[in-house]
């Protein structure tokens, strides 16, 4: 196919690539198709990542990534001299790699000044013109705009490659997550202790880092009751934050039903290994939902203020449950920024149970 892009990149001259994604856990996981697609198309290229330390489990063990560089946000707490020392050391590490191409997926100023300092032959970023001015845009050789109509974030990321002339018509765009041997062994032991068989349980993750994306205790409690009465075995999980753990415990206190409560007890790698062996995942728009998609586990996800067209479980069998409110998706932190989204609270438990049953029947 003929290409009409005047500034198409000659990838035969690209030996090393740096991908910058300084955001949260799920955001980092959703960049994994960039690494795998580049490796599929240009297997000889070395691809590195620059991410926050707490998000490293999302990329560690990924066979398409050579080096994961870290920005530790705790550097700021160690004083100015230590911060400058760490920043200098990171810059030296990055410069030593002599990157030919920088691909940026963050609107942080660090991305722009780092790109200027690294001085790659090519660099690409989203414009972020509503947040950044000319200095930002002149920091990169290639810029692309996100579409005004909703598009999945994975495809928006891949637009960075399209902007440079890369054709993706036959590329495998799936997410990837490596739990690792140690985490897999730990989960195998846990399942044996709880007398759970692979594909014989459902993982329910009723929390999110941002609980304005959350449902309500009573709704979850009723769903859990109906599922256990139907003979399903439930494993409950959450993040380690005390608020999330307490949220799960309050659900359990509302109804009497049997469930394995692992809320706050698993590492991210262990959570991924647990979800990978489940028959189904139930949860919110959260990193756990994206992990389920990455390991190929069918999902039922409740969406409120965030747009399911942009954030739905990627390339996995799934069902999204929403209510038809004229104001959604609003992308706000609750109605009136009050941390509670009414469009989620009106979802009926019976509807959730029906969707779960239908998905489980469809997936065998």
Image: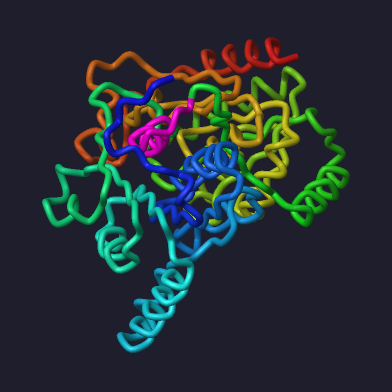
- At 28% from the left and 36% from the top, the residue drawn is 334
| For residue 1, above or below residue 193 | above
- At 78% from the left and 28% from the top, the residue drawn is 199
In the image: residue 133, left or right of residue 313? left
Quadrant housing residue 1: top left
Q: Is residue 159 magenta?
A: yes
Nearer-the-camera pick, 207 or 269? 269
Please indicate, yes or no, whether residue 90 appears anywhere in the rendered image: yes
What secondary structure is the stretch in magenta mostly built from? helix
In the image: residue 329, left or right of residue 99? left
Image coords of residue 57 (percent x, y)? 59, 55
Nearer-the-camera pick, 231 or 200? 200
Query: Magenta residues, as a range?
Result: 155-168
Please indicate, yes or no, whether residue 345 appears anywhere in the rendered image: no
- At 67% from the left and 22% from the top, the residue drawn is 227
Quadrant (top left, top right, bottom left, bottom right) of the C terminus: top right
| For residue 297, above or below residue 9 | above
Identity of the residue furthest to the left in this view? 134
Image coords of residue 100 (percent x, y)? 41, 57
Image coords of residue 270 (percent x, y)? 69, 50
Quadrant housing residue 223: top right
In the image: residue 175, left or right of residue 19? right
Image coords of residue 280 (percent x, y)? 67, 27
């Amino acid at each position: 196919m003929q290409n009409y892009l005047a500034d198409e990149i000659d990838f035969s001259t690209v030996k090393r690539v740096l991908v910058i994604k300084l955001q949260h856990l799920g955001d980092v996981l959703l960049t994994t198709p960039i690494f795998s697609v580049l490796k599929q198309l240009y297997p000889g290229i070395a691809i590195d990542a620059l991410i926050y330390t707490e998000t490293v489990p999302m990329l560690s063990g990924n066979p398409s990534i050579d080096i994961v560089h870290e920005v530790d946000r705790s550097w700021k707490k160690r004083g100015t001299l230590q911060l400058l020392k760490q920043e200098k050391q990171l810059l030296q590490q990055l410069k030593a790699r002599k990157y030919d191409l920088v691909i940026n997926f963050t609107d942080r100023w660090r991305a722009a000044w780092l790109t200027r300092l690294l001085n790659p032959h090519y660099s690409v970023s989203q414009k972020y013109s509503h947040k950044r001015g000319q200095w930002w845009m002149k920091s990169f050789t290639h810029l692309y705009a996100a579409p005004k109509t909703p598009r999945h974030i994975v495809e928006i990321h891949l637009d960075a490659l399209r902007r440079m002339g890369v054709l993706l018509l036959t590329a495998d765009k799936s997410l990837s997550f490596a739990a690792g041997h140690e985490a897999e062994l730990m989960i195998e032991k846990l399942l044996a202790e709880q007398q759970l068989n692979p594909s014989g349980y459902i993982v329910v993750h009723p929390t999110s880092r941002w609980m304005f994306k959350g449902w309500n205790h009573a709704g979850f409690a009723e769903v859990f009751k109906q599922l256990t009465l139907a003979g399903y075995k439930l494993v409950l999980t959450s993040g380690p934050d005390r608020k999330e753990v307490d949220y799960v415990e309050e659900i359990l206190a509302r109804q009497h039903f049997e469930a394995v409560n692992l809320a706050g007890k698993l590492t991210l790698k262990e959570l991924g290994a647990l979800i990978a062996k489940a028959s189904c995942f139930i949860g919110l728009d959260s990193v756990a939902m994206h992990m389920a998609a990455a390991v190929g586990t069918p999902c039922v996800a409740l969406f409120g203020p965030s747009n399911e067209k942009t954030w739905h479980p990627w390339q996995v069998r799934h069902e999204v449950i929403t209510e038809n409110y004229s104001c959604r998706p609003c992308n706000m932190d609750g109605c009136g920024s009050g941390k509670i989204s009414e469009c989620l609270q009106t979802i009926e438990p019976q509807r959730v149970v029906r969707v779960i049953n239908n998905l489980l029947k469809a997936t065998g």
